[in-house]
Each structure stands twice: as C-alpha cells, then as structure tokens.
Amino acid sequence: MSIHPLLADLLRTVTDWDSWAAGTATLSAGYELPDVHVEDLAVDGPHGPVAVRLYRPAARPASGAGLVWAHGGGFAYGDLDMCEAHVVSAELAARHGIVVASVGYRLATPGAGYPIPLDDVHAAWTWFVREAPALGVTRLGLGGASAGAALTGGVAVRVRDRGTRAPDALLLAYPGMHFPSPALPDEQVDDLRRLPRGIRFLPSPMLDMTRTYLGRLSGFPAEAMAGNGDVAGLPPTSVVVSEVDDLRPSGEMFLLQLQDAGVPTRAMVAAGMLHGHLDIPPVPDLPAIGESIDFLAHALVTD
C-alpha cells in the first residue's frame, strides 16, 4: 500500500481539509468539463424544496441508465459545485450516457441532523423514480461518496423496508457505513500514519461527525447507518475504496456483510488514492480517478 507520488508531494503543505483542497486544486489545471446538458431543479421534500442538478449526455446517446448521486462532506459540508458532485456527474453522463440527478441535500447541523439529509436524498429518489420514463431511464441506480454513500445506503434500506421502488444498483465510493468504524488491519496503518491528522478519520472527528448527523452515539435506526443493521435484500452493490483511507475497513466490511447476506457485490481498490479522491478531476496523471468513475458506471451500463 503506497500513496500516489503526486498526492504524497502535496502532503508536505497540508494540515487540514481546506489546505488539502487547495493543494489538489493545483492538479486540476487543464481539465475541462465534458459537454453535457445541465439543469438546476427543485423537487418537493418533507423539509421544503430539495435542490437537484440534472445531467444528461450531449455528445452521445443516452444509455437508458439513470443515477441519483449524493456528494460527501461529513454530512455537514459540501455542495453541488464540488468536484465530487459536479465533475463526477458530468463525467458519468458524458462517458457512459447516464442521466444523473445530483442531490443538494440539506447539511447536518447540531440539533438538525438525521433524518433531514436522508429525507432529502429520499425525496430526490422518489422524484427520479416518478420522472424516469420521461427522462428515458429504464435502469435506476442510487449512489454516493463518503457521507453521501451512507445517505444513499440509508435510502436503500428505507425503500427495502417500505416495499417501494428499490434501485437496480447501489454505487458507493469510499463509504463510511458503520459507527464505530471497523479497526484498521496492521498492513493498512503505516501509510496512514504519513497523513496529517487533520485529514484523517480518527476517533475524535468521527465522534463529532456522528453526533452532528445522528445527535447521539447509540440507538439509531439501521437506515441512519446501514452497516449497523440488516443488509439482506439490498440491491446489487458496487464499492470502490481508496487504498489509503481510515474508512477503507468500513467499505470492506460492508462488502463482507452484503456477501454474507447473499447480495451480489463488485469491489475496486483505487490504487494510491486517499479518501475523497473523486473530489479531484479525472486528470491523466491520476488514472485511478477515471477508473473509479468507470467502475461505478459499469454497474449500470456496459458500453
């Protein structure tokens, strides 16, 4: 396990997520967003309108696949303009003809966390299911990155339990699906110790993030953290984990739980990548980013 050299170079000046974002922005030079149709919408939700940004392919035929996608950000940060939302959605549409609905869910704040972000993602899913025929979508996926993976996993649990339309595929990038997160194996520890503490998921920030989103540390329903509940009956699931990531064991444990329950799975380890690698555009010098996007897409459509 080793950190990609380009990312390792950036770590010399990184102390926290803000400085990490500033460093990775330098890798975006020369990247151009692909040609796609983009439309900003608002859909009805139980807490008011939910922002949805719809991406449709422009330079290639639509594939018939559609995806509701949720960005990450520890439940309390992130937006529709971040690379993990905007660039990933555009690349999925341009590369694979997928119609993508990126969800601008309400961010958790102390005292206003679960179920609000989850309800917003569920509202976007309900809208997408209803609009799928008009959008030319016949195969529906649901997915997200990091905290967005936890939210979309929660929606998958909710629709399973309610008996409503389930996704045909669940697509998760470097997910955190458990509290507490599973322990790191010895062989994954050394490179993580090279990372600044400010961009790691150590116990203290994990406690703060969980308290902000869930408001407590125990007694929460399975839809709030899917890996803590029964995963039987969930859709076929594809998981990409970052090779150097404190949350990698959570993604790998979730895969084992799904497999144990008879749920079909696909897995990819993004070589040399850190948590949040989809928040960097798929530049040629970091091929694992584009490979991750393609891996997720292939669960819905095979070119």
Image: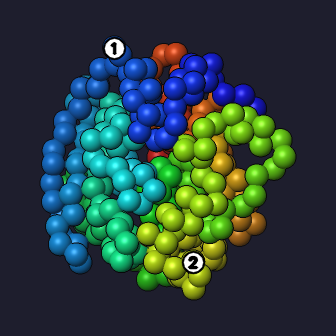
Find the residue positioned furthest to the right: 186
Above-or-below relation of 50 to 144: below
Q: Residue at x 64, y 60 (%)?
A: 203
Q: Which mark is residue 142?
A: none
Alpha carbon separation for disc pair 2 and 1: 44 Å
Q: Label 1 neighbourhood size at 10 Å, few (<14), some (14-19), many (20+)?
A: few
Closer-to-camera residue (152/104): 104
- In the image, taking residue 208 as reference, residue 31 lies left or right, namely left
Q: Quadrant of residue 124?
A: bottom left
Please give the residue where the numbered disc 1 appears in the rendered image: 30
Which comes before the other along the chain, label 2 or label 1? 1
Q: Residue at x 44, y 83 (%)?
A: 162
Closer-to-camera residue (50/276): 276
- In the image, taking residue 263 as reference, residue 165 lies left or right, namely left
Is residue 302 in sight in this rendering? no
Find the residue positioned furthest to the bottom: 219
Q: Residue 139 at x, y = what percent? A: 40, 53
Q: Residue at x 47, y 34 (%)?
A: 20
Please give the residue where the numbered disc 2 appears in the rendered image: 217
How are the residues colored? rainbow
- In the image, taking residue 253 as reference, residue 221 lies left or right, namely left
Q: Quadrant of residue 104?
A: bottom left
Q: Which residue type carries mark 2?
A: Leu
Q: Nearer the viewer, mark 2 or mark 1?
A: 2
Q: Residue 274 at x, y = what percent? A: 59, 36
Is residue 273 in sight in this rendering? yes
Q: Which residue type carries mark 1?
A: Gly
Q: Residue at x 57, y 77 (%)?
A: 217
Q: Secondary structure at mark 1?
A: loop
Where the N terminus falls, by quadrant?
Answer: top right
